[in-house]
Image (cartoon, grey):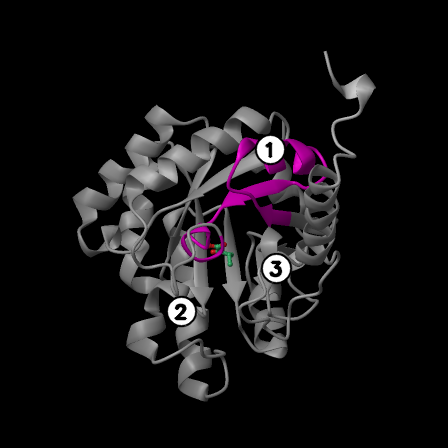
Amino acid sequence: MITTTHILKKKRNEKITMITAYDALFAKIFDGEVDMILVGDSLHMSFFGESDTLGVSLDSMIYHTKAVCNGAKESLVVCDLPFGITQDESEAVKSAIRVYKETKAQAVKLEGGVEVANIVKGITNLGIAVVGHIGLKPQFVRADGGYKIKGKSDKEIEKLFLDAKALQDSGAFCIVLEGVKSEVAKEITNLLEIPTIGIGSGVDTDGQVLVWSDAFGFFNEFKPKFVREYLNGASLVKDALKKYVSDVKSKNFPNESESY
Ligand code: KIV
């Protein structure tokens, strides 16, 4: 089983791989192939069909994390803490405790930098591993007026450095850098002792994460520039489905060997 120690040791040695999963079926396929499986709150968009991640509940995150843990025996499972819980420090700590008690996830992830440093400290002090998430934070999409790339201005760059350092000092064992200008992500990666996991942040982070339904062509509402589509999943499934429907209609399915 991959542990946080394995992930830390990969810094400056070997790229770290991470992908999202929301159920046991796909977790089983991904298990052992990637270092970490993230039960991201992106499930509220790609799995539940909402337009952003903000409405997902802790109960839903726990339900999906339990499912992923049923499928993943080797890869390190991370559960995203949903929007709203970091407003209140004790609520956030209680939420992380619930995740650890009710699922077999090895870590929780939360969005934010300096402003959540105390929460990260409170959670890690309890022995719960934390993944940070800075740069483009999807939970701030409404406040930011859209998905905005970070690290374009000196002010943004300074904030990113402060955030990254604060998360490291508070005990996070790695940090997701989302939508950060490549050269800034590289500098942050070089500065930190803990690994950075990039998404839309160039090639120089310590690892990469993608949302599985983006990477395998199942989520086609919009396609950010950073997504590489490794499979045309939706169209393959649709073709197979059409074949099934046609076989049923033509009485080609089931045949004798498929009948009792
Ligand atoms: O929710 C999610 O899937 C994420 C990734 C985009 C890192 O936070």
Total marks placed: 3
Q: What is the magenta range?
A: 18-46
Say whether marks 1 and 3 touch (CB < 8 Å): no
Label 3 C-beta lies within 8 Å of the nearest ligand 1 atom: no
Residue 3 at what x, y percent from top left? 58, 32
Foreground residue among 23 and 78: 23
Mark 1 sits on what residue?
25
Foreground residue among 223 and 49: 49
Mark 2 sits on what residue?
162
Residue 99 at what x, y percent from top left? 35, 33
Measured Cα–Cα span from mark 1 to mark 2: 39 Å
Residue type marked 3:
Asp
Q: Residue at x 73, y 46 (%)?
A: 240
SS type, badge 2:
helix
Residue 16 at what x, y percent from top left? 67, 49
Magenta residue check for 66 = no
SS type, badge 3:
helix
Measured Cα–Cα span from mark 2 to mark 3: 30 Å
SS type, badge 1:
helix
Foreground mark, 1 or 2?
A: 1
Q: Earlier in the sequence, mark 2 or mark 3?
A: 2
* Vertical order, 40 against 160 (above or below): above
Quadrant location of residue 187?
bottom right
